[in-house]
Amino acid sequence: MEKAAKAVRRSSARLLSFGAGHSDLNVLISELKDMRNSQKAYANAQTSACQDFLKWSTNAENRALQDVANQLSELNTLWTEVQREFTDQLKEYRQTWEKVLEGEKHVNQSKNNLAACDQRENKIKRELKKAYKKAPRSELEALEAKLSQAEQAKDFAQLEVDERMRENEAIKLIRIKEGLLKLSNSYIDFAHNTAVVFESQRNIALQLPDVHDQELEDIKYTGSGATKHYVMKAKDEIKKNKERAARSPYYEPPPPYSPTDNVTSDSSINSSLNSSTNHGASPRRRSLPPSHGRQITAEDYEWKSDDDGEDLTGAMGGFHIS
């Protein structure tokens, strides 16, 4: 069904440009519009799913899930903004091609004018050829004057075509190069922000207690401070990324997180969780993984949970946990 709809849409774009030319450009612009609409629909679907998760968690009577769902909802707001900015860039890229199409139309207008001048000149030549046989001298002189004007108009039209073609080719290269560079940097920026958001989501998910090989009565949720910290950290990283982009349209974003750093981050968090669960140590003060290319602050080494330790009474399928 989707393939059929796409085929109909492309055919419609070709039909709309029938007679005017530039069918391939019109199809390209149509596809870019559909690409942006698909991205917007994808972002809206993600927001709906996140809201449904949050709604479900409020009735789950599980404070760990409620806290994680709340922070992921906050993170999703940030993620939605990242996607909105990306779709804005897709719109700008489509407008680049619309301007290219407009330039091609102007060249066509000049060519059509040249063709009309050529037809007018040929028509006058035919009339003059017939007039040589029987027309008076005055009529011949009038036709010759008209022919001279037609030839002049044709020469001007030819100059206009040549000038517009040169100008259009230069402007077309400038616009397409600039559009592609902006789009490429937008994708790079989008990829970096995606990594920031979903690394934070992963770290928030890691705060959920690990119940394997443990008694439910011994489990307490102490991750509310950590989840808030990861959301704030993501906001700060994306804010810095925007500032870098604002300073230079073709900036280089910071390098992506390496797999080694991610493994270290996961292992350190899991180790801390297991340590706090098995030995009763509070995870409110512990070292975080090394920062990625930024100055380490005191905030990286310390956070405070809202509570000394939230128990999960009634959280695990009706079990009462002290």
Image (cartoon, rainbow, N blue to C red):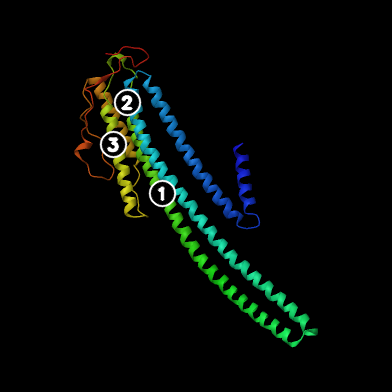
Q: How far apart are marks 2 and 1 (CA)?
A: 32 Å
Mark 2: few, some, or many residues within 10 Å (few <14, many ≥20)? many
What's the residue type where badge 2 is placed? Asp
In front here: 218 or 263?
Answer: 218
Residue 130 vs residue 239: left or right? Answer: right
Badge number at residue 238: none
In the displayed structure, does residue 308 sit left or right of residue 22?
left
Outermost residue on the right side: it is 134
Q: Mark 3 points at which residue?
A: 232
Give, as a three-letter code, the residue at label 1. Ser
Q: Which residue is drawn at 68% across and 76% down?
A: 121
On the image, the x and y values in percent for residue 68 come to 34, 27
Residue 67, label in figure: 2
Q: Earlier in the sequence, mark 2 or mark 3?
A: 2
Q: Judge by depth and name the residue closer to the eye, 179 or 18.
A: 18
Q: What residue type is labelled 3?
A: Met
Are the two marked residues, 2 and 1, in contact with CB atoms closer than 8 angstroms? Answer: no
From what the image shows, is residue 39 above or below residue 70?
below
Secondary structure under tag 3 reads helix
Sequence-wise, the earlier of marks 3 and 1 is 1
Mark before the other along the chain sequence, 2 or 1: 2
Dot 1 lies on which element?
helix
Residue 209 appears in view: no
| The N terminus: image quadrant | top right
User: Is residue 188 among the parts visible in the rendering?
Assistant: yes
| Image location (x, y in percent) of residue 174 | 46, 62
Q: Residue at x 49, y 51 (%)?
A: 94
User: Where residue 95 appears, x then y in whole percent?
Assistant: 49, 53
SS of the residue under disc 2: helix
For the residues labelled 2 and 3, the Cα–Cα distance comes to 15 Å
**Is 14 situated left or right of 202 in this image?**
right
What residue does disc 1 label?
186
